[in-house]
């Protein structure tokens, strides 16, 4: 391929936050486009912003990125605890403190003669990307989350893979639920957004879908279970987002990670729901938490193609010097938006929207 004539640049890439299927595909597409079309040089910082702080990186070349398109995870590794604007350190008295060490990262970027920093991450990671932009660094963001809850872009890579994994497991759980006439409660990721539960629940023929956007009551869930019993379907499959909550109640917190920028970790709603339901129905209730299974394994074909589009667009933004912006999808097309405008803009399920109405039309209960 003929290289486009442009100023030779050196690009640094990092992946922050939780891993997502498609990260490697973005790295693959970005690297190949930058090298083959524009003649740029690339490096990748390991473990997200921690690698930037420690100046720990690897070369990104056609050779080092060969064969990674289909792989889940990230060859650059990741961390969801390292905010260089409030970095955990120990002072001279042995006390843990948070310090702004962003200038160390900037020094490292200058030392390696980096022209552009490409950051792949979710809201927290991109917040730091915006902050580095404010300090004069040329930054381009690429949105990443399996939860599909970033408001500026229509679809995030990793979401389709997660939905496929949950759908497959719902199918497996259907057979055991029917064989034993059980209630199976399946807890999935998503935090405060119910996209994974909604789409997988539809595709996997769930009977009840519980999402954070629609607070539920046990009475309504029991009502659905009893309805199925009366109709000769004495088993029920329930899919619930980790951040779902009962009407007037709170989400179940699995644990608190103090040294994380996002310390609240949801988890346990599935087990709690199964426990609370069992005395109210004439069935044994079991719970399954799919957890990080939703993030692992090979990336789906749809996510590979989407990730390639994100990576290629980021490379073209570098060439066009569209710095301080994030790649986004609008109307099915790859565009970009200022990092200043994307932070904190979330996309939640509309309780009265088409997808919820579609599910209700099929007789699926939302517990409300």
Image: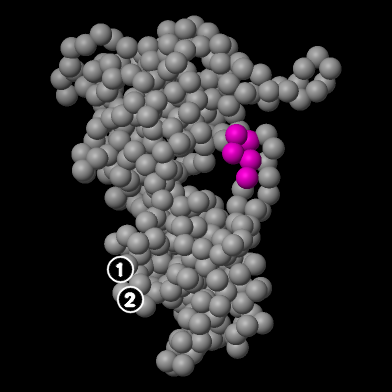
The image quadrant that residue 79 belongs to is top right
Q: Work out whether residue 164 can be spotted.
A: no
The secondary element bearing badge 2 is classed as loop
Most distant residue in the front direction: 248
Q: Is residue 353 left or right of residue 117?
A: left
On-image quarter of the N terminus: top left
Point 63% across, 36% down: residue: 260
Left or right, 326 with respect to 75, comes to left
Predominant SS of the magenta segment: loop
Q: 291 left or right of 365? A: right
Quarter-of-image position of residue 281: bottom right
Q: Residue 43 in the image: x percent, y percent?
A: 42, 20
User: Helix or strand or loop: what does disc 1 sit on?
Assistant: helix
Q: Residue at x 30, y 35 (%)?
A: 328
Residue 114 lies, in percent from the top left, at 41, 12
Where are the magenta residues, as a range? 260-264
> Quick check: marks 1 and 2 in contact, CB under 8 Å?
yes
Q: Residues within 10 Å of mark 1 (few under 14, many from 20)?
A: few
The residue drawn where x is 54% and y is 25% is 49
* Neighbours of disc 2 within 10 Å: few (<14), some (14-19), many (20+): few
The relative height of residue 159 versus residue 204 in the rendered view (above or below) is above
Q: CA distance from mark 1 to mark 2?
A: 7 Å
- In the rendering, at what x and y percent does residue 29 appear? 30, 32
Give the label on residue 358, or none.
1
Q: Tell me: residue 26, above or below residue 176.
A: above
Q: Is residue 244 visible?
A: yes
Question: Residue sitting at 63 percent across and 45 percent down?
Answer: 264
Q: Which residue is mark 2?
A: 362
The percent position of residue 353, horizontal first and vertical second, equals: 32, 60
Q: Is residue 296 magenta?
A: no
Number of numbered markers: 2
């Amino acid at each position: 391929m003929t290289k486009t004539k442009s100023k030779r640049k050196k690009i640094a890439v990092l992946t922050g936050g939780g891993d997502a299927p498609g990260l490697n595909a973005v790295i693959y597409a970005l690297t190949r486009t930058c090298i083959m079309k524009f003649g740029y040089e690339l490096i990748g910082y390991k473990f997200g912003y921690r690698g930037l702080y420690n100046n720990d990186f690897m070369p990104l070349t056609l050779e080092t990125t060969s064969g990674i398109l289909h792989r889940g995870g990230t060859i650059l590794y990741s961390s969801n605890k390292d905010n260089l604007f409030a970095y955990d350190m120990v002072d001279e008295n042995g006390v843990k403190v948070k310090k702004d060490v962003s200038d160390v990262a900037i020094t490292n970027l200058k030392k390696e003669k980096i022209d552009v920093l490409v950051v792949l991450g979710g809201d927290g990671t991109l917040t730091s990307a915006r902050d580095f932009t404010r300090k004069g660094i040329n930054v381009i963001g690429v949105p990443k989350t399996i939860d599909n809850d970033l408001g500026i872009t229509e679809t995030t890579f990793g979401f389709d893979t997660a939905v496929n994994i949950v759908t497959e497991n719902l199918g497996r759980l259907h057979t055991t639920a029917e064989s034993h006439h059980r209630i199976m409660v399946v807890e999935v990721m998503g935090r405060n957004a119910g996209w994974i539960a909604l789409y997988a629940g539809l595709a996997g023929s769930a009977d009840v879908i519980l999402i954070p956007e629609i607070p539920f009551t046990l009475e309504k869930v029991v009502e659905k279970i009893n309805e199925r019993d009366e109709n000769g379907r004495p088993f029920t499959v329930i899919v619930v987002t980790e951040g779902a909550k009962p009407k007037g109640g709170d989400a179940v917190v699995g644990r608190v990670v103090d040294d994380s920028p996002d310390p609240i970790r949801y988890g346990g709603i599935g087990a709690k729901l199964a426990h609370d339901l069992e005395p109210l129905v004439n069935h044994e209730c079991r719970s399954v938490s799919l957890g990080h299974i939703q993030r692992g394994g090979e990336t789906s074909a749809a996510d590979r193609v989407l990730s390639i589009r994100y990576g290629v667009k980021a490379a073209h933004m570098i060439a066009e010097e569209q710095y301080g912006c994030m790649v986004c999808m609008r109307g099915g097309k790859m565009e970009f938006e200022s990092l200043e405008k994307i932070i904190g803009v979330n996309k939640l399920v509309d309780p009265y929207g088409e997808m919820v109405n579609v599910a209700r039309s099929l007789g699926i209960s939302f517990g409300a």
